[in-house]
Image (spheres, coloured by chain):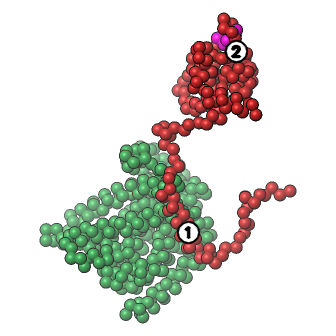
Amino acid sequence: MLIEALIKIVIVLFTVLTAVSYLVLLERWISAWLQDRIGPNRVGPFGLFQPLADVLKLLLKEDIEPSQSEKWIFWLAPVISIVVAFSVLAIIPFGSSIILGGKSYSLAIASGINIGVLYIIALTSVGVYGITLAGWSSGSKYSLLGGLRSSAQMISYELTLGLGLVSVVMLSGTLDLGGIIQSQISGGWNIIRAPLGFMLFLISSFAETNRQPFDLPEAEPELVGGYHTEYSSMKFALFFLAEYANMITASAVMSVLFLGGWHVPFLHTMGLDPTLLAVLGIGAFALKIFAFIFFFMWVRWTIPRFRYDQLMNLGWKVLLPIGIVNIVLTALEKTYLLN
Amino acid sequence: MQYRSKYNNPKPNRKLTLWEKLYFPEIVRGLLTTIKHLFRPKFTRQYPEEKWEAPAAFRGRPVLVMEENGAERCVACGLCSRVCPPLAIEVQASETELLKERYPVRFEINMLRCIFCGFCEEVCPEEAIIMSKDYELVYTKYDDAILGKDKLLVPKKDLQERLDYLRKMRNV
């Protein structure tokens, strides 16, 4: 049991870390292509070894700690960010279950967590601490402003995120991610059953992962670099890693909650071999995650950043009321349409 | 007097229409605009492999025109040296058996000083010093940047385009 979990952890961590380093390359490519440029193409064939060069550069940089910083917290903040980003992956079901040697293995590190949705919300809330503490402990006003912004932003948008989640929980009747996928297999994907909830969740995911147009915590033109202004070397790399890992996590959560996770419509009716079905499921899940990540990047290179007051207006005066209305609508839908 | 053109303030405080206030349709429009660019040809020039061919009007490194017989056109009048704003040119004259009677024994352009203004070319009565298309000017030592006659002399046939251009522009 322990060995099984360890193997899964190693596989997931390895995959995600590799994916993260290549997401940085992908982001640079997409930004280049959307601006009629070519993008990185010098290191290796098509620039495919660029992530290696980047990692090497970050490892060899000097690690600077500002004299005004709170050493211990300054060190702790990136660790919190990265731990939170990765620990959500623990409950994501990457596929149905795979049968090897007559024994069935579930494709989630911790399967059957019956409070999965709560776990996600709890951990993403802890993620705020990483950024806020980083901003505060740096002893720099730019970092502090970035940290303050991020705490205000993430608290505001967590409400909307939660309200979007509530509609999913109402429709599925369970907090277990596996159960939510099962309910989508029988009753249709949640993106169709709760489109408004999906929109709310998508928008607040952008805010939660600090991606454009909600990247106020790091707003380069105003705050130099925001909360990670004073960070260098591998500590900075951890924040960088956490941002992209968060993106993967958010995409995975959205795929599970709204796009049926590893489910491909009509595939299980074709009578395929169960092992092949499981592998195809993993592929479909990866594809859905990739689609979301592409969307994240596409939006980043299209929409300019919000102003701080606009951000707050959108969060509290627009998205929150819509979220509450959405719950009522979902309740009506559940009572009258789906019964 | 108002120094405000219609370009720097197109429509001040234009009220948004209801469609624009809905926000999402406009975001979708923006996303469609950017995705179109994904499939457009790229503007990037892959520089060291793909070089830019300068037009005749380009003012690159100043060079001396070398006639077919291997001698320079320059008669060492020193006008270029006189007009040069950053004092980059140094000419030392001497006598020659050729028809032009005078020639430069030493002709040096300090490329660390040159500002590519083209005054030397403009003032030259012999069309002897002209601006070439050479823009890849990298020197690893200070001494390398001071170009003597050996590096300045370029055969006339390689500079024909610029000479024709000067003829054309001067006859206007």
Using the rendered image of the protein, determine whether residue B75 is visible from the camera's viewpoint.
yes
From the image, give the main secondary structure of the stretch colored magenta: strand
Question: Is residue A190 or residue A145 the one in the foreground?
Answer: A190
- State the mark number for residue B29: 1
Magenta region: B101-105
* Amino acid tagged 2: Ala
Label 2 element class? loop
Question: Which quadrant of the view contains residue B133?
Answer: top right
Residue at which label 2 appears: B76
Residue A186 percent across, percent down from the top left? 31, 83
User: On the picture, is B85 further left or further right than A238?
Assistant: right
- Check the residue under mark 2 and report the chain it is in: B
Q: Residue at x 45, y 91 (%)?
A: A332
User: On the picture, is A263 further left or further right than B70?
Assistant: left
| Chain colored green | A
Question: Is residue A147 or residue A263 the one in the foreground?
Answer: A263
Residue B102: say if magenta: yes
* Amino acid tagged 1: Arg
